[in-house]
């Protein structure tokens, strides 16, 4: 697999991308076609061997992508990560400041709830009274 810089799009591309896709399809077909469902040790061994071949090809492509990315984008990635780190550290500092602030007197609001279900309403009122969120009504 080779790459080129496309002057029209100003992007790096895989040479003959469509052919590479077709070649990958053939590779998968050659190495995984006819794979039977795993039902015993023999089919497990066959599946494991075929998966190993596919994974090795995957690792090869990933290695190539990472090498090309390192060559083409290496310095940009380093610079970008430095800037991202600075911004992340400042965000974390502000978050710490925000978390350090705790109101002296917490404020809780128990809003009016309307329902046509009397049983649910009674349960909610009883629970609110247990939590001292609702005072007993004097008759």
Image (cartoon, rainbow, N blue to C red):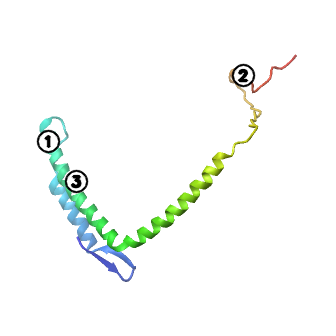
Name, please, the residue furthest toward the left.
42
Residue denoted by label 1: 45
Residue denoted by label 2: 118
User: Where is residue 86 drawn, in percent x and y?
Assistant: 53, 63
Disc nearer the start of the sequence (3/1) = 1
Disc nearer the start of the sequence (2/1) = 1
Disc nearer the start of the sequence (2/3) = 3
The C terminus - image quarter: top right
User: Where is residue 135 drawn, in percent x and y?
Assistant: 80, 23
The circle on residue 100 is none
At label 1, counting other C-alpha atoms closer than 10 Å, the crowd grade (few under 14, some 14-19, many 20 or more) is few
> Residue, x 13% and y 44% (percent of image)?
46
Instruction: Give the side of residue 38 with respect to residue 129, left or right.
Output: left
Label 2 secondary element: helix
Q: Quadrant of residue 58?
A: bottom left
Label 3 secondary element: helix
Name, please, the residue furthest toward the right.
139
Instruction: Give the side of residue 125 with respect to residue 9, left or right.
Output: right
Vertical relation: 92 (above or below) 86 = above
User: Where is residue 27 drawn, in percent x and y?
Assistant: 18, 60
Q: Toward the viewer: 36 or 136? A: 136
Residue denoted by label 3: 55
Q: Quadrant of residue 123?
A: top right
> Residue, x 57% and y 54% (percent of image)?
92
Instruction: Give the side of residue 78 with respect to residue 100, left or right.
Output: left
At label 2, counting other C-alpha atoms closer than 10 Å, the crowd grade (few under 14, some 14-19, many 20 or more) is few
Whole-angstrom CA distance, mark 2 to mark 1, is: 63 Å
| Front tag of 2 and 1 | 1
């Amino acid at each position: 697999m080779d790459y080129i810089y496309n002057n029209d799009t100003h992007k790096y591309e895989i040479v003959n991308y469509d052919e590479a896709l077709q070649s990958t399809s053939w590779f998968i077909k050659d190495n995984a076609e006819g794979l039977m469902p795993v039902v015993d040790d023999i089919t497990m061994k066959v599946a494991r061997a075929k998966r190993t071949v596919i994974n090795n090809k995957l690792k090869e492509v990933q290695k190539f992508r990472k090498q090309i990315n390192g060559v083409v984008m290496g310095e940009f990635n380093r610079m970008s990560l430095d800037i991202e780190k600075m911004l992340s550290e400042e965000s974390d500092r502000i978050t710490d400041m925000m978390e350090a602030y705790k109101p002296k007197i917490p404020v809780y609001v128990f809003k009016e709830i309307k329902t046509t279900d009397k049983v649910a309403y009674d349960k909610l009122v009883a629970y609110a009274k247990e939590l001292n969120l609702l005072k007993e009504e004097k008759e």
